[in-house]
Image (cartoon, rainbow, N blue to C red):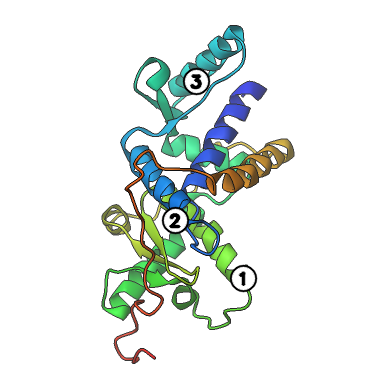
Amino acid sequence: MKLIEKQLVVRVLAETDVLWTPLRFNDVGAEAAAAIVERRSQFRERGLLLAIGGAQADRQQARRVILKLEADGLLCLRGRGKKRSVCLTRRGDDFARSFCPTLRIDESWHLLERVGRLHAEFGTAKHLLEQDILGIRDWDDATPLLELEDLALPLLCAGLLDACGDTEGRVGYRVTNAGRKALLRMKPAPPIELPKPDANARKKFNELYVRGLDERRRWRSTRPSHVVIPASAGDWPCRRETPCV
């Protein structure tokens, strides 16, 4: 794979992960939250609207690279002209996450299975609090919660998990309809013929991801009246045999 092709795949992965990183309302304001939810809805319909700048020759080269990646089965294109948008195919997602590297769907599958089991244990299909998924009550140590985010991210991007935040900045996860259907099938095997981890790709991904999360706080919805209301901190489901306190 040529360097320019790898750079574009890394960029699409980073922008996708930024979009689907769970919302914590103690970090992202109401206006940005509304914009994030709006863009997520648009992503499911058409993917990412990829801005391509530079001189005309640079833009033409970028378009050729995009078409090449589509032909290779790594990108899916939608729309035409300036409205053209992109998203990673399943193969493209595995490919990009392998050389960045971040966790792939097959490496996160056990989380999907765990949340599915907990839905039955809790007697609900609603979002389950991250601490309950992890089985911890230490609210001061953020490390396990961030590790859970990393594990959930490829599943969130694929639409197999969904996340929501509460008024205290906590996050809950639930298995989507697509996720339940996926669980009825065999666990995906590790993909074959994937690229080796690339330190430069990892560095670039981290730069784009960190910058993207910062920029996300300043996103604004195209519909000023659109409001996202966080979940109440006391509304998370409890195990059926355990009273809520």
Label 2 belongs to which residue? 30
Label 1 belongs to which residue? 142
Q: Can I make out residue 91 in this image?
A: yes
Separation of marks 3 and 1 at Cα, in angstroms = 38 Å
Which of disc 1 and disc 3 is earlier in sequence? 3
> Quick check: 121 left or right of 207?
left
Q: Secondary structure at mark 1?
A: loop
Separation of marks 2 and 3 at Cα, in angstroms = 34 Å
From the top left corner, tell me how far across and down residue 112 is, in percent: 40, 62
Q: 10 Å neighbourhood of mark 1: few (<14), some, or many (≥20)?
A: few
- Identified at 38% across, 57% down, the residue is 161
From the top left corner, tell me how far across and down residue 118 is, in percent: 36, 74
Q: Is 212 placed above or below 233 here?
A: above
Amino acid type of the residue that numbered disc 2 sits on in the rendered structure: Ala
Q: Is 189 placed above or below 145 here?
A: above
Which of disc 3 and disc 2 is earlier in sequence? 2
- Identified at 38% across, 22% down, the residue is 83
Q: 10 Å neighbourhood of mark 3: few (<14), some, or many (≥20)?
A: many
Label 3 belongs to which residue? 66
From the top left corner, tell me how far across and down residue 117 is, in percent: 34, 72
Please tell me in which quadrant of the rendered image residue 193 appears. Answer: top right
- Asked if the residue under mark 3 is in contact with the one under mark 2, i.e. CB atoms within 8 Å, the reply is no
